[in-house]
Amino acid sequence: MSAAFFKVLVIALALALDVFAVSVGVGVRGVTPGRKVIIGITFACAEVGMNVLGALLGLLAGRLIGAAAGYFGFAALVGLGIYMMRESRSDLGVASRLDLTRGHGLFLAAFAISIDSLGIGFSILYVGVPMPISLIVIACISVASTFLGLTLGRWLGSYAERNAAFVGGLLLALTGVLFTVLKALRIG
């Protein structure tokens, strides 16, 4: 496995933990198999769409600020990771009133979990893997994470939901630091 592909895999797994956390929360209430497919596709489309938007913004930034754009993208990973860790520890209580399996609630959940993908898209151009392959990996892992979270939600409950979001944020922050060091040392 190439170093660049490994980087995309790490990013996809970090994003998947956020998706997993939301899916566990939704799965606690029980979800039909057909609804799992709809939720999985919705979450994956949101993740990929925000990555594409972020990549377009990253291209623009790359043209404007040159080689430093990669460092800004990796700094965005660190910032998003810290944000995810902080948010995982806040208790808003809004999600418990919304039905996150359909309609407005599903849209809000998909949007919320995909915000971090905007920053990932900004930095993913500098990882060294063609964008279509990166998006396919992210989409597949997102769908698998959604199915796993929804399926295990009944058994894992709120403990895993809270901590998966924190771990996902921690992984994103550490990934951003690692990618910055690798780029500075011209490794990978």
Image (tube, rainbow, N blue to C red):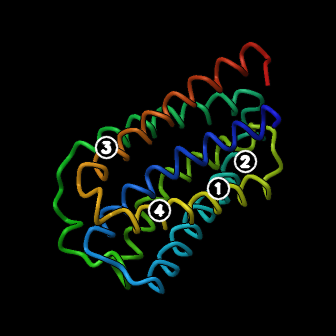
Question: Residue 17 location, x and y as percent?
Answer: 46, 49
Circle 4 Cα neighbour tier, 10 Å, few/some/many (<14 / 14–19 / ≥20): some
Quadrant of the image occupied by residue 127: top right
- SS of the residue at dot 1? helix
Q: Nearer the viewer, mark 1 or mark 2?
A: 1
Residues under labels 4 and 1: Cα distance?
15 Å
Q: Nearer the viewer, mark 2 or mark 3?
A: 3
- SS of the residue at dot 2? helix
What residue do we see at 62% from left, 65% from top? 49
Residues under labels 4 and 2: Cα distance?
36 Å
Disc 1 designates what residue? 138
Circle 2 Cα neighbour tier, 10 Å, few/some/many (<14 / 14–19 / ≥20): some
Counting residues from the start of the chain, the first of labels 1 and 2 encountered is 2
Counting residues from the start of the chain, the first of labels 4 and 1 encountered is 1
Q: Above or below — where is 45 with respect to 87?
A: below
Question: Residue 10 location, x and y as percent?
Answer: 62, 39
In-image side of 53 versus 112 (left or right): right
Residue 148 badge: 4
What residue do we see at 23% from left, 42% from top? 89
What residue do we see at 37% from left, 85% from top? 103
Q: Nearer the viewer, mark 4 or mark 2?
A: 4
Q: Quadrant of the N terminus?
A: top right
Q: Amino acid at mark 1?
A: Ile
Counting residues from the start of the chain, the first of labels 4 and 3 encountered is 4
Residues under labels 4 and 3: Cα distance?
15 Å
Residue 60 badge: 2
Residues under labels 1 and 2: Cα distance?
22 Å
